[in-house]
Image (spheres, helix red, strand yellow):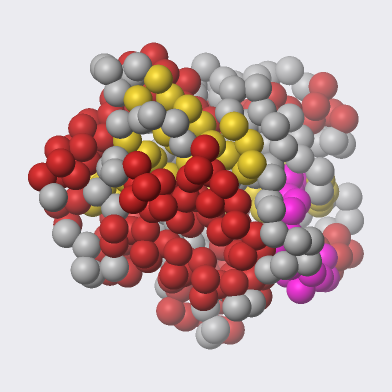
C-alpha cells in the first residue's frame, strides 16, 4: 500500500523496557512489508534504522518536561508522510505538534492510560499532571485512537468521554511465535540455579506498582514448600518502590531459603525464552494491564499462566484453558483485608497448577496454539493500516 508512515515512540529496539517498546519493535518490520515507507522517530541513543533524539532539557529537570522538549525535536524531524502514529504519552505530544505542523492525520495507540496510573505521581511529581495533560490533549485531537484490547477501549472511553466511539479502534498486541517458542535447552536455567526436578514459578517485568510484584512476593509465602520462585525483575520506578520490594523479598528469602531467586539485570530475550519454557507457571499479578504482552510470551513458550483478571488480561489468558485468572478490584487497593485475600487466592491458583503438572502442561499447549491462531503480527499490521486509511479519510473530511 502506498502509505508513508512516521512512527513516534520513546522505546525502540535494542533499547526497550516495556510492552510498548516490544509492540513497536514487532510492528514496524511488518508495516514495512505492506506500506511504501515507515520512518521511526525515537528517544535516547542512536539506532541503525531509526532517528533517535536525546533528551534536550538540562540534567535535573523533571522527566515530563524533558520528554516534552524531546517531543518538539521529534516533531521537527518528521519527513514527508501520509500519517503519524504515536505510542504512549511520551510521544503523543510530538504526534500532536507534527500533525498540526504538517496537516496530516495523527493516530495514537493507548498502551496504557495516565489517569489509571495515579501511582506515577510518586515518580513524576508535578510532571504527572503534565503527562496527563499531554495524553488527554493528544487523544482528543487525534484522528483515530487504537486500543490494544477491548478492555483498554472501555477505559479510553471512560477516561475521555468526549471521544467519538467511532474513532476508537481495537488492534491487539501480538507475539512472534517463531521468536518465543519452547526452548528445552538448560544452560540458562542451570546457570540461575533452578532445580529442574521441582516446580518453578516465574515472573518477568519491572518493579513498579502496576506489575503487582510485591503482591506476588507476599503470595509466595503460601506456595507449597517445594515450589521455586524466580523473579526476573529490575528498573524500579522509584527508590521507595525499590525499598518496599526489597524488604518483602528479604522476608520471603528468610522464610523460604534456597527457594527464591531474584535477577535484577535484564536478560537477553533468548534467555528469557528458555526460563519461560522451564517454568511450571508464569505469574502475572498486575493491578493494571492494558493487555500484557509478557503473558503472550509465556503462553507462546507453552507455559501456563496465573494472572490477575484486570484490563485486557482476560482477552489473552482464557480462564480454565490457558491458565487461571484471579479477581482483583483496583478500587480496593487500599483495603488491607482485600489485598491479603487477593494474595491468598493468587497463591491457591499457583499451588493448583504446581500440584498438577499435567494440567499445567495442557494449559501451556493450549496457550501456544492460541498465540498462533489469534495474535500474529502480520494480522495486527494489516489491521493497523486499515486504521491509518480510516484516519486519513476522517482528516480529509474535517
Q: Where is residue 258? Give x, y as percent.
A: 88, 50
Residue 78 spot, x, y in % from top left? 46, 36
- In the image, residue 295 lies at what x, y percent? 51, 42
The residue lying toward the viewer, choosing from 137 and 233, is 137
Closer to us: 391 or 291: 391
Q: With 365 as the anchor, is 52 left or right in this view?
A: right
Res. 41 in view:
yes
> Which of the two residues, 163 or 268, is positioned nearer the viewer here?
163
Please give left or right for residue 320 compared with residue 215 in the image.
left
Was residue 58 drawn as part of the magenta stretch in this picture? Answer: no
Q: Is residue 152 left or right of residue 90?
A: left
| Residue at far left of view | 397
Question: What residue is at 44 percent from the left and 31 percent from the top?
Answer: 79
User: Which portion, as a residue range, is magenta?
Assistant: 227-247
Q: Is residue 42 above or below residue 259?
A: above
Q: Quadrant of the N terminus?
A: top left
Amino acid at each position: 500500500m502506498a502509505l508513508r508512515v512516521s512512527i513516534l515512540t520513546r522505546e525502540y529496539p535494542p533499547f526497550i523496557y516495556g510492552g510498548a517498546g516490544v509492540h513497536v519493535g514487532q510492528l514496524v518490520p511488518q508495516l514495512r512489508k505492506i506500506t511504501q515507507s515507515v520512518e521511526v522517530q525515537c528517544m535516547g541513543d542512536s539506532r541503525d534504522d531509526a532517528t533517535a533524539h536525546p533528551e534536550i532539557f538540562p540534567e535535573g529537570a523533571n522527566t515530563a518536561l524533558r520528554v516534552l522538549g524531546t517531543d518538539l525535536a521529534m516533531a521537527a524531524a518528521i519527513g514527508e508522510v501520509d500519517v503519524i502514529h504515536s505510542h504512549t504519552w511520551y510521544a503523543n505530544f510530538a504526534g500532536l505538534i507534527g500533525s498540526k505542523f504538517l496537516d496530516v492525520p495523527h493516530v495514537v495507540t493507548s498502551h496504557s492510560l495516565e489517569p489509571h496510573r495515579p501511582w506515577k505521581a510518586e515518580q513524576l511529581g508535578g510532571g504527572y499532571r503534565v503527562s496527563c495533560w499531554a495524553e488527554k490533549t493528544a487523544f482528543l485531537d487525534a484522528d483515530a485512537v487504537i486500543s490494544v484490547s477491548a478492555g483498554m477501549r472501555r477505559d479510553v472511553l471512560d477516561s475521555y468521554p468526549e471521544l467519538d466511539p467511532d474513532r476508537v479502534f481495537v488492534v491487539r498486541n501480538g507475539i512472534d511465535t517463531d521468536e518465543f517458542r519452547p526452548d528445552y535447552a538448560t544452560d540458562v536455567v542451570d546457570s540461575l540455579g533452578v532445580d529442574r526436578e521441582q516446580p518453578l514459578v516465574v515472573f518477568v517485568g519491572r518493579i513498579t506498582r502496576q506489575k503487582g510484584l510485591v503482591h506476588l512476593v507476599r503470595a509466595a509465602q503460601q506456595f507449597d514448600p517445594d515450589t521455586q520462585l524466580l523473579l526476573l525483575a529490575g528498573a524500579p520506578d522509584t527508590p521507595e518502590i525499590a525499598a518496599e520490594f526489597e524488604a518483602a523479598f528479604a522476608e520471603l528469602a528468610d522464610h523460604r531459603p534456597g527457594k527464591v531467586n531474584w535477577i535484577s539485570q535484564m536478560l537477553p530475550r533468548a534467555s528469557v525464552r528458555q526460563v519461560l519454557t522451564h517454568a511450571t507457571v508464569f505469574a502475572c499479578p498486575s493491578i493494571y494491564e492494558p493487555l500484557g504482552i509478557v503473558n503472550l510470551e509465556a503462553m507462546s513458550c507453552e507455559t501456563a499462566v496465573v494472572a490477575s483478571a484486570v484490563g485486557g488480561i482476560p482477552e489473552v489468558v482464557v480462564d480454565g484453558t490457558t491458565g487461571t485468572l484471579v479477581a482483583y478490584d483496583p478500587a480496593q487497593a487500599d483495603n488491607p483485608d482485600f489485598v491479603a485475600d487477593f494474595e491468598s487466592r493468587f497463591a491457591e491458583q499457583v499451588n493448583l497448577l504446581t500440584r498438577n503438572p499435567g494440567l499445567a502442561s495442557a494449559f501451556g499447549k493450549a496457550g501456544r496454539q492460541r498465540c498462533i491462531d489469534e495474535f500474529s503480527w502480520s494480522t495486527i499490521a494489516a489491521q493497523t493500516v486499515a486504521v491509518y486509511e480510516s484516519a486519513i479519510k476522517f482528516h480529509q473530511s474535517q
